[in-house]
Image (spheres, rainbow, N blue to C red):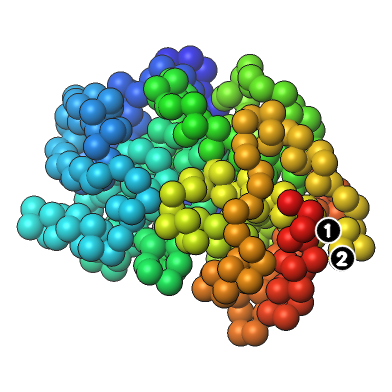
Amino acid sequence: MNEIENIRVNASESYDVSIFRDGLDSCGEMVRKVLGKCRLAILTDDIVDALYGARVMDSMAAAGLDCIRHVIPHGESSKTIGNVMEFVNLMADNHFTRSDAVVALGGGVPGDMAGFAAAVFLRGIRYIQIPTTLLAAVDSSVGGKTAVDIAAGKNLVGAFHQPSLVICDTATLETLPPSVMRDGFAEVVKYGVILDEKLFEEVSEPPVKDIVHVIAGCVSIKRDVVAEDEFDNGRRQLLNFGHTVGHAIELLSDFRISHGEAVAKGMVRAAMMGPVMGLEDCTGAIESVLKNYGFDTDCPYGAEELYYAALSDKKRKGDSITVVLPRGIGNCDLFRLTGDEFRLLLKKTENQI
């Protein structure tokens, strides 16, 4: 194992995010050190299971940890309450107790589902995140947001539940298809736009040379934001840059457009809204970097479609919705808009695409 980059997240539960390369076979020792002797229920998907399931199970067993494993089909369509309940029932059938724990192995879908299952089973048990995608490593595995999708929208049923440890072996990223790796860079670019101009410049021209450094930078930004606003009532909403329109695009496409692609489109649309609101025009800079990674930033849906899809978004409160707009690269702000104001912004930027 190469040198470990440890980042401490201080929230309602404090934990380490350990980032390294070529150390997945030591994950059992790391989990045992944090949780002690217990039983583990691993949730993963079929693709990740074929690559890493046996290795993780063997590592846990070598550390004296008994494991069971539940495998779901890969993809956003698996992120349902029904699949979470199958996993919860598996733990119940195996007589898991509050001293036992869940392990999320994979990308954002297993991570969100496993965290939600851990949050609701026995009113909350511990869980470990082992992200194997860049998107999960820099974003969904850290911060304690867990959820499933329902017909009305993405991540509408969930809970805040912090993990006990996040283990990120960057060697797992080397098995990702290029499109999945690219999706993660949409979130990396997002971090640069909202709070770190230097990071934005560092990743503006692929390929990225030091992925451990990039992941650590993103996690450090999220750590600071979560410490200030764990339950997403204020500054943490900056992390939603590009997501209001992005989630609407995902929903309208029936998730055929991936999260990273949708967020890339959403960030460009949000950047277009900035000048309409009297802010600096960052559209060209953001779009240029995203196109360097191969993103198609055109939006296939009209303003009215996006507006009605966004009405189900979690960021909506009453008759208003909060959008994140850039004042400049590395400097974004929150804007509370009425539904009519948001609708008008969508219409004013519709023909710029």
Q: What element carries label 2?
A: loop
Q: Is residue 352 visible?
A: yes
Q: Quadrant of the N terminus?
A: top left
Left or right: 97 in relation to 45: left
Which residue is rendered at x = 35% and y = 24% of the image?
24
Q: Determine whether 18 is above or below 115 in the image.
A: above
**Tag count:** 2
For disc 2, the marked residue is 277
Q: Where is residue 171 in the image (x, y as percent from the top left)?
A: 43, 20
Which residue is rendered at x = 23% and y = 46% of the image?
72
**Of residues 80 and 294, the one drawn nearer to the viewer in this rendering:** 294
Give, as a three-letter code, the residue at label 2: Met
Q: Position of residue 85 (x, y in %)?
A: 21, 62
Q: What element carries label 1?
A: helix
Neighbourhood count class around disc 1 (C-alpha, 10 Å): few under 14, some 14–19, many 20 upward? many
Left or right: 73 in relation to 237: left
Measure the C-alpha gap from mark 2 to mark 1: 5 Å
Left or right: 161 in relation to 291: left
Asked if the residues shown at circle 2 and circle 1 are in contact, with their CB atoms under 8 angstroms apart, the answer is yes
For disc 1, the marked residue is 274
Q: Point out the residue furthest to the bottom here.
A: 318
**Of residues 191 and 348, the one drawn nearer to the viewer in this rendering:** 348
Q: Determine whether 153 is above or below 223 in the image.
A: below
Give, as a three-letter code, the residue at label 1: Gly
Q: Is residue 196 visible?
A: no
